[in-house]
C-alpha cells in the first residue's frame, strides 16, 4: 500500500456509473518522488489527511460491487508518518 | 487512477477483434514525468480533454465483454486539474 | 497499453510449455525512457513495426488458454506514431 | 518479490475491517532507489528485519479471506542480502 | 516479461508454506536501470543464466497450486541477449 496525503478532489460528471458514490481524491505519495494519482474514497478521508491506499486488483475486495477503480483509500493514518 | 490529457489517437487495422469499437487514445499523464500511454475509450473523450484513466484488472469491470485492454478512460474531468 | 517498436526476438528452448507457439519479441517503448521488455506475439508483428502491447491480467483475455505471459502484442499500428 | 527492510509500523484506526489483524509495516526496498511502501504482515516480521514482499493479486493467495491488501510479507530472510 | 540475469539466491526459513519448493532467485534486469528483484524458480535456472521472468497475476498460471508469488522464471534464454 502507498501512504499519501489528500490534496484535493476532482469532479467528473461524465463517468462510468460504477464510479458514482465515491469521492475522487488527488493523492500525493509521501515517500520518494512518485507522481500524484487519484484514489476513490468512501470512508471519509479529508483534505490534508494521511491515508493508506491500495491499488490494483486488491481494490475490488474493498467494493460492494465491482467497478473500474484501480486505487482506493483503505485507511486513514492516526498520525503523520514519521519517515 | 491517472489523470491525463488526450493527445491524439492511434489506428491499428491488424488487431485483436476484442479491441474493435474502442478508440485508442494517446494519453499524457498530468502529474510528474510519467510516459505517454494508450487507453481505450468508449465514452467519447476528445482531443485536449482531461480524463481519468483506470489501469490493470479494474479495466475489465468497465467492459461489457472481456478484452485484452489494460487501460481505459473511466471519466472526463469537468475542469482542468488545478494541481 | 504501451506503444513500442519491435527490436528483435529472443529464443528460449527451456521454457514453460504454455509459452510454445508464441514469438517472444523484445519491445522498445516509444514514449519516454522506459526499459525494453519482452512481449509474446501471435498476430505476426515483424521487426521494426510499431505495436500496441497490453500487460498484466488483461493479457489472459488474448489467449485461448491461460499461460504465464504478462505482455502481449494486441495490435500493429498502421503508421509510426507522430508523438 | 521485493526484498526490503522493515523500518517501522503505521497505525490506522479508521480502516476497512478486512485489514484488522495485520500489522502495517513501512518497508524500505533494499535494491535501487524505489520508494518506501507499506506491506501487511501476519508472520511476525520485526523492525530491522529483511523480508520478502509479494505485491498485486498474488497477495490474495496469502490471505485466509480476501482483503484490499496489495502487498504482504511472505518470508523473512535468514541473512542480510549480500547484494 | 522481463529479461534478467540470475545473480544469486536468498534463503528464507520463516515463510509461507506455499513458497516451499521454489528457489528464490535475485534477478538483475538486463535492460535499463530497473531494480533487482526476486523471482521464484522451479525450472532449474542457474547463477549467471539469462532468464525470462513473468510478473503479476500471470504467475499463477505457471503454478500447480496458487501461491503468493508475484514473479517467476518462465524460460531460460538460449543466448545472452544482444541488446
Image (cartoon, coloured by chain):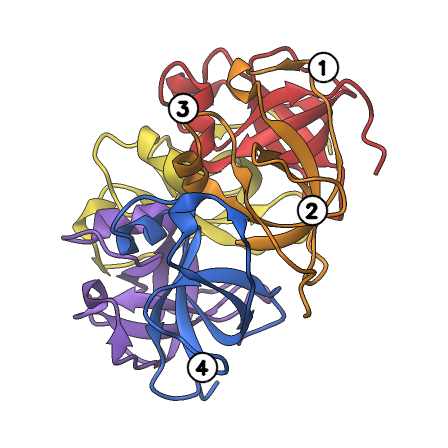
Chain colours: A yellow, B purple, C blue, D red, E orange
**Disc 4 from disc 3: Cα separation:** 38 Å
Q: Nearer the viewer, residue B9 or D24?
A: B9
Looking at the image, the residue that sits furthest to the left is B64
User: Can you tell which mark lies on residue E65?
Assistant: 3
Q: Same chain, marks 2 and 3?
A: no
Q: Nearer the viewer, residue D20 or C81?
A: C81
**Residue drawn 59% across the image and 65% down it:** C36
Tell me the CA gap for discs 4 and 2. 33 Å
Q: Which residue is mark 4?
A: C49
Badge nearest the viewer, 1 or 4? 4
User: What residue sits right under mark 2 in the picture?
Assistant: D34
Q: Residue E45's x, y, as percent?
A: 65, 40
Same-chain status of marks 4 and 2? no
**Reading the chain from its start, which is encountered first: label 2 or label 1?**
2
Chain bearing mark 2:
D
Q: Which residue is mark 1?
A: D46
Residue at 42 percent of width and 42 percent of height:
E58
Position of B75 compared to E12: left or right? left
Tag 2, which secondary structure?
A: loop
Task: Give percent across and percent down for residue C10.
Answer: 56, 63
The verdict on a common chain for dots 2 and 1 is: yes
Identify the chain of the residue marked 4, using the numbered disc in the image. Answer: C
Quadrant of the rendered image containing residue B17: bottom left
Q: Do the numbered discs 1 and 3 sit on residues whose CB atoms are within 8 Å?
A: no
The front one of E63 and A46 is E63
Tell me whether marks 1 and 3 sit on the same chain.
no
Q: Which class describes the residues within 10 Å of circle 1: few (<14), some (14-19), or many (20+)?
A: some
> Tag 3, which secondary structure?
loop
Q: Is residue A46 visible?
A: no
Pointers 2 and 3 in contact (C-beta within 8 Å): no
Amino acid at each position: 500500500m502507498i501512504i499519501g496525503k489528500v490534496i484535493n478532489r476532482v469532479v467528473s460528471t461524465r463517468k462510468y456509473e460504477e464510479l458514482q458514490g465515491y469521492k475522487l481524491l488527488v493523492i500525493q505519495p509521501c515517500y520518494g518522488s512518485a507522481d500524484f494519482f487519484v484514489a476513490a474514497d468512501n470512508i471519509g478521508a479529508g483534505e490534508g489527511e494521511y491515508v493508506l491506499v491500495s491499488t490494483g486488483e486488491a481494490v475490488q475486495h474493498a467494493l460492494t460491487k465491482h467497478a473500474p477503480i484501480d486505487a482506493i483509500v483503505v485507511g486513514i493514518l492516526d498520525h503523520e508518518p514519521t519517515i
